[in-house]
Amino acid sequence: MEERKHFVLVHGACLGAWCWYKVLTLLKLAGHHVSAIDLGASGVNSKRLDDEIASISDYLQPLMEFMACLPQEKKDLELTKMLVRPTGFFVEDLSKESLLTKEKFGSVDRVYVICKEDEVMKEDFQRAMIEDYHPKQVVSISAAGHMVMLSKPEELCQILLEDIAHK
């Protein structure tokens, strides 16, 4: 029997764990354990962005608490932070300390999914991000919009299963 992976699905800016409902269901049906986390002031997280989320640490606190609660042997789980993209939030925090170091962001194998029909971030911009962040692998999904987890969930799930869970 194949090893069951634990996927932690982390939404992008201005979303919530809800955006993963299609992919989460497909991964569970494939036999994997899946957790979708609401970051600070997102989804059902009750904190308010304007007065309770003062830093990126506040924003990421729910994810950090979740990761700290995992048993030590589960620390090698598959952390899926899809489409890591810059936003206008926490620019000051990010300018002080990079979260994208080898020891932090670099310790997680990443597969970048190019969304061919993304009208928010055009393919040229996506390719520039690939150059900056050096994912282990790059794949494309035709006709995928900005929120690939909603526009092409089956294709995204297939990539997660083939390129992450089965390696």
Image: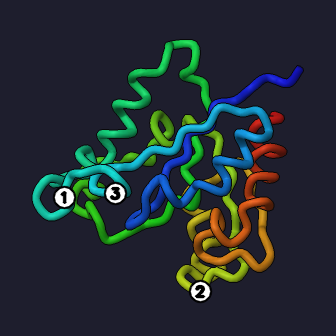
Q: Residue 101's x, y, as percent?
A: 45, 43
Q: Which residue lies furthest to the right in this view?
A: 1
Q: Residue at x 14, y 53 (%)?
A: 52
Q: Name the residue under label 2.
A: 119
The residue carrying mark 1 is 48
Q: Which mark is residue 145?
A: none
First in sequence: mark 1 vs mark 3: 3
Q: Name the residue under label 3.
A: 42
Q: In this view, does 162 lie above or below 113?
A: above
Tell me the amino acid under the disc marked 1.
Answer: Arg
Q: Nearer the viewer, residue 61 or 121?
A: 61
Q: Nearer the viewer, residue 166 or 108?
A: 166
| Apparent side of residue 98 relative to residue 82 in the rendered image (left or right) | left
Q: Is residue 134 above or below residue 109?
A: below
Left or right: 138 in relation to 129: right
Tell me which amino acid carries mark 3. Ser
Q: From mark 3 to mark 2, how far is it between C-alphas?
A: 23 Å
Q: Which amino acid does label 2 sit on?
A: Glu
Front residue of 83/21: it is 21
Q: Do the residues labelled 3 and 2 touch (CB within 8 Å)?
A: no
Percent x, y for residue 66? 40, 31
- At mark 3, the secondary structure is loop
Among the 4 quarters of the image, the one containing residue 141: bottom right
Q: Can residue 104 be seen in this view?
A: yes
Q: Look at the numbered disc 2 and give the secondary structure of its residue.
A: loop
Going from N to C along the chain, the mark reached first, 3 or 2, is 3
Q: Quadrant of the N terminus?
A: top right
Q: Which of marks 3 and 2 is in front?
A: 3
Q: Alpha-carbon distance for marks 2 and 1?
A: 29 Å
Answer yes or no: is residue 106 visible. no
Circle 3 packing at 10 Å, graded few (<14), some (14-19), many (20+), is: many
Q: Is mark 1 on a helix, strand or loop?
A: loop
